[in-house]
Amino acid sequence: QKEVEQDPGPLSVPEGAIVSLNCTYSNSAFQYFMWYRQYSRKGPELLMYTYSSGNKEDGRFTAQVDKSSKYISLFIRDSQPSDSATYLCATYLSGGYQKVTFGTGTKLQVIP
Amino acid sequence: DTGVSQDPRHKITKRGQNVTFRCDPISEHNRLYWYRQTLGQGPEFLTYFQNEAQLEKSRLLSDRFSAERPKGSFSTLEIQRTEQGDSAMYLCASSSGTSGSIDEQYFGPGTRLTVT
């Protein structure tokens, strides 16, 4: 079993839709939970992160972590064609360096 | 700040050949990471440097792989006797080593290796 599981999609939605991306993880020791966005032929870029459980909002993006169920979510409101990319959830243990464990990524296409 | 750069962007090689990739991190970032990403998968950790010291290597990094960061600045990743299974995107990332909060890793564009 992988440490981080993510539905690979692909996911295709019309412009303006609400998008829900989800991951589960197995190691209860993970403390930081991140979402990266990766455009085609580019490296991943950090979109947002949360520490431990809770919600975090940044513009049209909301990240949620439920440590009791080991569930990570990213919601995108009013999705735009420019949001079309692969979204990777990721986690790491607190302390020390960041050995980041990534999910497989979900490819999102927002259709104008 | 020009970001993390990697060279070459794409490498095609024949099975059995050696290849070397270079990564130039963001200046003054003391941490450098290598990841491998295959099609349809997320990046997988390969190795990590703190300045010039290689502090951890993944079990994915077989003895055909070697990474160096000789002066704590740029890094090289060499693959000897390449195999078709080595075909992947090799990503480099760097971070400043900030403590107390997330130490954001900034990724380069990657080197895509194709072994024929």
Image (spheres, rainbow, N blue to C red):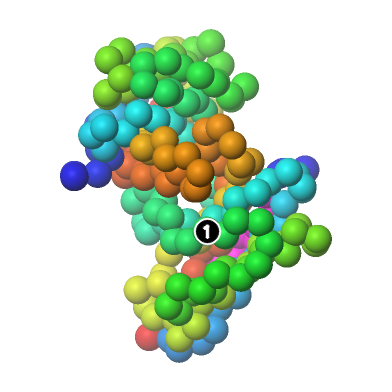
Q: What's the residue at 73%, 43% (across, down)?
A: A29
Image spot of residue A58 (x, y percent): 45, 73
Q: What's the residue at 56%, 32% (across, down)?
A: A96
Q: Answer above or below: position of A47 versus B95.
A: below
For label 1, the residue is: A49
Mark 1 crowdedness (10 Å alpha carbons): few <14, some 14-19, many ≥20: many
> Residue A9 magenta-drawn?
yes
Furthest residue toward left: B2
Residue type at mark 1: give it. Tyr
Q: Answer above or below: position of B111 versus A49.
A: above
With A81 as the anchor, is A28 left or right in this view?
right
Quick one: quadrant of the N terminus of chain A? top right
How many numbered circles does the render carry? 1
With B2 as the anchor, is A94 left or right in this view?
right
Image spot of residue A49 (x, y percent): 52, 58
Image spot of residue B57 (x, y percent): 55, 21
Image spot of residue B21 (x, y percent): 31, 25
Can I make out residue A17 in this image?
yes
Q: Answer above or below: position of A24 versus A84.
A: above
For label 1, the SS is: strand
Q: What's the residue at 61%, 41% (across, down)?
A: A94
> Residue A97 magenta-drawn?
no
Furthest residue toward front: B100
With B109 as the anchor, is A50 left or right in this view?
right
Question: Foreground: B38 or A89?
Answer: A89
With B112 as the anchor, is B55 left or right in this view?
right
Asked where in the image residue B69 lies, by quadrant, the reply is top left
Magenta residue span:
A4-12
